[in-house]
Amino acid sequence: MTHQGNPFGQVLVALVTPMTADGEVDWPGVEKHIDACIQQGADGIVVTGTTGETSTLTDPEKLRLVEVGKDVAAGRAKIITGGGSNETAHAIDLYQKSEKAGADGIMIVTPYYNKPTQAGVLTHFRLIADSTDLPVIMYDIPGRTGIPLKYETILRLAKHPNILAVKDAKGDLSEVSRVLNQTDLLYFSGDDANVLPSLAIGATGLIGVTANIVSGPYRTIVDAVNRGDLAAATAQHRKLEPLVRAVMTHVPGTVAAKYVLHGLGRISSPRVRLPLVGPEEWEAAIIEDELALVKDVDGVDFSNFRPDRNAAAGGALPKIAGTTR
């Protein structure tokens, strides 16, 4: 199926999965958090991605996240399912079930751990894209998966009618420009620090971790770029810089985002599932020092920030283990 235009949105939140103190998914918390992100300005929600702790979610949890997301969004935002699998057959099954659950699109990550050649990557993406009518975002994050989506592979995959976009977490802006010149792909910044630079050279939008805390300023940046107002976009970029640094620099983004959201009273617990753990004392102190530099960011007030290092400490073992099959 050929999809016209942009079926994903422009301000996409790489959603954290709120959990209880014992590591079970906090379903009322999920609903509340999705609604808050959309009310602030997000027009896309990526569930079960890296930030959503996809590696330790069960398949039933992943599918329910799609269903809950669709119910809460109620047409206000697109629901994209991320994660997938490094096993092609499992990924196909999961994405087909996600389509039936109501997903508006899928985000396919390059196969991690296996480290296939680019021919294997090409086949993995093509077979998954063949198996669904949903529009596809390719997720290029070699720092986590161990392999990149090479330029030549991107060009070949861009010819598939269902593959419409790339989430780029490499930070190679010269390659972004090169691909944009040679394809009609939509580009999404997957690196919070590079949102504005990416948009300035033609990217479509962002899939952001920090947007869990504030999606409104990203809406402002995107809208400003859309109308050609670089000064307004730059002003928001500068205000967000210390918050992005706090969330994305010292511990995994999932861990920091949950720590901050809990300290703001937005989620009931900062708990993550093992092997992720909450910030150690010195890491939490650095994050808090960075947050003290955040000023005049719409949608968040750190004068009410009440961090709880004890609640964040350690990680949880859920009752049911996730599975690769």
Image: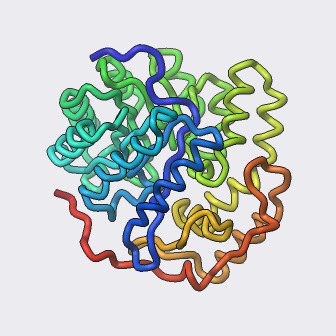
Can residue 296 be seen here? The reply is: yes
**Pick the front one: 79 or 93:** 79
Q: Quadrant of the N terminus?
A: top left
Give residue 25's position: percent from left, percent from top.
39, 66
Which color scheme does this rendered protein use? rainbow
Q: For the point 73% across and 50% down, which residue is it?
A: 299
Q: For the point 43% across and 56% down, which residue is it?
A: 52
Q: Residue furthest bottom?
A: 310
Dividing the picture into quadrants, the one containing residue 285 is bottom right
Q: For the point 74% across and 69% down, which residue is it?
A: 305
Give residue 257's position: percent from left, percent from top.
59, 61
**Pick the front one: 182 or 59:** 59
In this view, 48 is above or below 310: above
Q: Quadrant of the C terminus?
A: bottom left
Can residue 117 be seen here? The reply is: no
Q: For the point 41% across and 46% down, which residue is it?
A: 69
Give residue 303's position: percent from left, percent from top.
82, 66
Q: Is residue 308 left or right of residue 168?
A: right
**Pick the front one: 38 or 14:** 38
